Amino acid sequence: MAQSFESLAELLEQSADKFKNNDMFGTKQPDGSWKWLSYGDFRKLVADCRGGLASLGVRAGDRVAIVADNCVEWAAACFASYGLGAQFVPMYPAQPEKEWEYILSDSGSKVVFASAACYDRLKQVAARVPNVERVIGIDLPASDPSSFAALQAAGAKAPVPVGDVKGEDVAALIYTSGTTGNPKGVILTHKNFCSNVVASGSRFHFDANDRALCFLPWAHSYGQTAELYTFISFGAAMAINDEIPKLVDNLAAVKPSVLVAVPRIFNRIYDRVNKQMDERPALIKKLFLSAIQSATKKSQGRSLSLLESWGLALANALIFKKVRARFGGRLRFVVSGSAALSPEVAQFIDALGIDVYEGYGLTETSPVATTNYPGNRKIGSVGKALPGVSIRIDTSVTGEEKNGEIIISGPNVMQGYYNRPEETAQVLLPDGSFRTGDLGYLDSDGFLYITGRIKEQYKLETGKYVAPSHLEEQLKLSRYILNVMLYGANKPYNVALVVVDLEAIEAWAKENQVTVDNLLESEAVRTLIKEEIARYGSDFKNYERPVKFLLITEDFTQENDMLTPSMKLKRRNVLAKYESQLEALYRS
């Protein structure tokens, strides 16, 4: 059914009218139960918050910021700002304080919301930013005038109606992850977001009976559009995940019908299930592996023999059904985005009986540009362009016949970078198209394939170009490798920085009766990792394979500033710590 709304404020009003009594947000309680808030009750919460912000002097065109994980108050602050015609500026709790300060200053934010974990630190940061007039503590007691509860109470006494918000009005400044330098504020209008919600929703069948478990950060455009706004447009219910380590347990409790995720989650599922199968009797493991092959064969449209069909049915009853039950048992499909999903992992999840649809986009495209969808899917691709969006490939940057820079045009493309006219001019063409900086090609059916990123690509001494991110994702499929970064710019060959999974290696050492005093210096462990790199890098071109490697135990995380909040590798920061050791590999 076609949807029509000019702004995100109108989107909420429409859904709250239509689905007033439906569950909207679920939050986990201390006793493990889930408490649900209806669409009608959430609209009242937004109205009170809107009135409260107005009482603080927030007007159309002002900016309201937030530093918090996903919560009902996050969504309320967001839609309250939209209803006033104000612009929302989300940030992440895991970001360095220097980035909070930069974003608050650069955006000119007037009010900022903060969760309990960030409130005290954010107060100190805000004191150094003259334009910030008030810090609202989401978790402060109602008696505190700076609390979210006090803001609600003030708004209830002085209600303000939803303003006349136009599609061309700016909805948000979403600051990019900043793998290099300060983050850039991406200017996105209500039309940008709404066009993406409608187009994405037209590719998938959602309805008010659907339920999702939301764990992607809404501070990122992917979580905002693909989860928050799209599910609201269909009146679906959203349980808000509390902690990533509890994700699988929460899936079993919430029983979602759809899930929007990133490759890292699917990689964990792949790794966990394979580990469990390794511990099962040889006959069960053989049945499992042969059934995965049969399911993949079937999904590719090839016919199965009677024995293969029987084996697949048996595996489904004995194994796959139990695996699906761990994720609630109701998943119709999952959507993957934000980074490259290994075809091997996609086929694996698909074989378990959970359809996987991979998409592609950037913050600058609100974010979805292409996606696989029911009836139109090729595993390994990121799908076809959304309705109203067009993709073209600029091969002049590579000199190749098909592969080149991906250029996107459509109503989802940003207005530019805030306060950065020169950088805007570098990526926005005169016709409004966006140069993504990503490399890829289109096949004859219009499916897009990503081959790398121009900024990450480097040249070996031999003149060969290496696009590392896809290769790294493949190596991370090893259960013994938590993370990896390839290195080799202007070098004769690639080397690798490998973050080992200590728990997995210790289990391997015990199982194989290997005595290990120092894991990182053990020849047995080094041989194991060498074999794993050879196994998972078997499809690499000769010049892409790492010849040597450095083993470390500290993972790449947001906390040590080596990953962005969208889980992309901050290569410059990793090199700042490990470059000298990587360089030494070429001298050894």
Image (spheres, grey):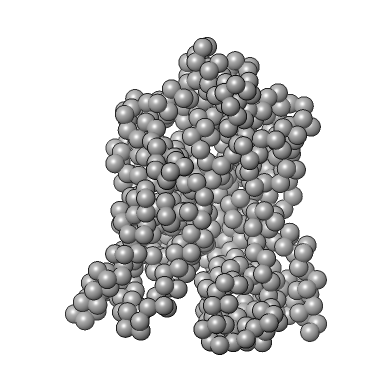
348 in relation to 405, above or below: below
Residue 88: where, in percent of width, then height?
58, 32
**For the point 46% across and 54% down, which residue is it?**
247
**For the point 78% across and 62% down, which residue is it?**
576
Q: Quadrant of the C terminus?
A: bottom right
Relative to residue 430, is residue 101 drawn left or right?
right
Relative to residue 494, is residue 141 drawn left or right?
left
Residue 354: where, in percent of width, then height?
34, 60
Find the residue positioned furthest to the front.
Answer: 31
**Residue closer to the observer: 242 or 431:** 242
**Residue closer to the observer: 436 or 550:** 550
The answer to whether residue 182 of the structure is visible from this angle is yes
**For the point 62% across and 34% down, which residue is it?**
114
Residue 411: where, in percent of width, then height?
49, 39
Residue 272: where, in percent of width, then height?
45, 68
**Residue closer to the observer: 289 or 342:** 289
**For the point 52% across and 73% down, which residue is it?**
479
Q: Quadrant of the N terminus?
A: top left
Relative to residue 470, is residue 119 drawn left or right?
right
